[in-house]
Amino acid sequence: MEVKLWNDKRERETYENFAELYAIIKASEKLEKAYVRDIVPATDYEIECQNLITHFKTLSSAYKDTIPSVERFHDTYKMECPAAMNRLITSGVPATVEQRAAAAASGGTSAAIVAECVQNFITAMDSLKLNMTAVDQVFPLLSDLSGSLNKLSILPPDFEGKTKMKEWIGRLAKMAAADELTEQQARQLHFDLESSYNSFMAALPTTGA
């Protein structure tokens, strides 16, 4: 006899969200173990890990009402994925980024500030993906990102991320709080964020430095 898990469309969406979150956590656990065992190259690991973290943050933000506690979700379904939980919740960045942050710290740069910059980049990009395009939603995110970038002494004054965020903040400051970015503006901002993020990652010292 077929067992029906849902009674309406809303319940069906809830179970689909549960399934997606479950898959993300399981995939992250397998990826972490593969990286530790040198089964997957660092470059491939970082790309896939960042994708999983982004999907996780997007999902947990969009469905925080139906999934208020990922930790409880993990325990309820007896997932036993400690590495994934550490990566997705505690760290929030790939292990390779943590290693570069540690290398930066050895050169006098705070690993905590590097991690803060990464988190602010990801949060801003995720928010745009969730169509959070009102000025009073975007402005504080870019301000936080700009502030964290300015704390890093390894970044020059003309660093791409600094100049682009300054330009966007100046543009948003002239708009009303309730104004919305157009689709073209939101797309350009996401492009600038992604480009700046890639430049930021490239500017970090390698673990061998």
Image (cartoon, grey):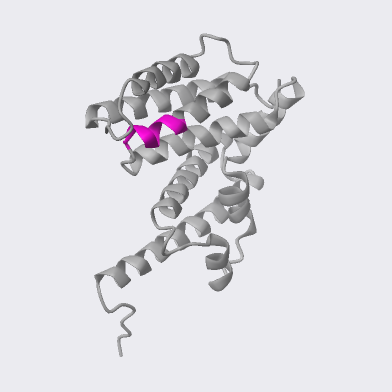
Judge by depth and name the residue closer to the eye, 132 or 198.
132
Q: Is residue 43 at least partly visible in the picture? A: no
Quadrant location of the C terminus in the rendered image: top right
Vertical comparison of 57 with 209: above or below? below
Vertical comparison of 90 with 177: above or below? below
Q: Residue at x 41, y 53 (%)?
A: 59
Q: Is residue 41 at least partly visible in the picture? A: yes
Residue that extends furthest to the bottom in the rendered view of this protein: 1
Vertical comparison of 124 with 70: above or below? above
Q: Is residue 3 magenta?
A: no
Q: Quadrant of residue 103?
A: top right
Judge by depth and name the residue closer to the eye, 119 or 47.
119
Q: Position of residue 183 (x, y in %)?
A: 23, 32
Q: Residue at x 51, y 23 (%)?
A: 146
Quadrant location of the N terminus in the rendered image: bottom left
Magenta part of the chain: 133-141
Q: Position of residue 203 (x, y in %)?
A: 57, 19
Q: Is residue 139 magenta?
A: yes
Judge by depth and name the residue closer to the eye, 98 or 209.
98
Q: Position of residue 147 (x, y in %)?
A: 55, 24
- Side (left or right) of 204 relative to 139: right
Q: Position of residue 113 (x, y in %)?
A: 64, 29
> Which secondary structure dominates the residues rendered in magenta?
helix
Q: Quadrant of residue 169?
A: top left
Q: Residue at x 63, y 43 (%)?
A: 38
Q: Quadrant of residue 140?
A: top left
Q: Residue at x 42, y 17 (%)?
A: 164
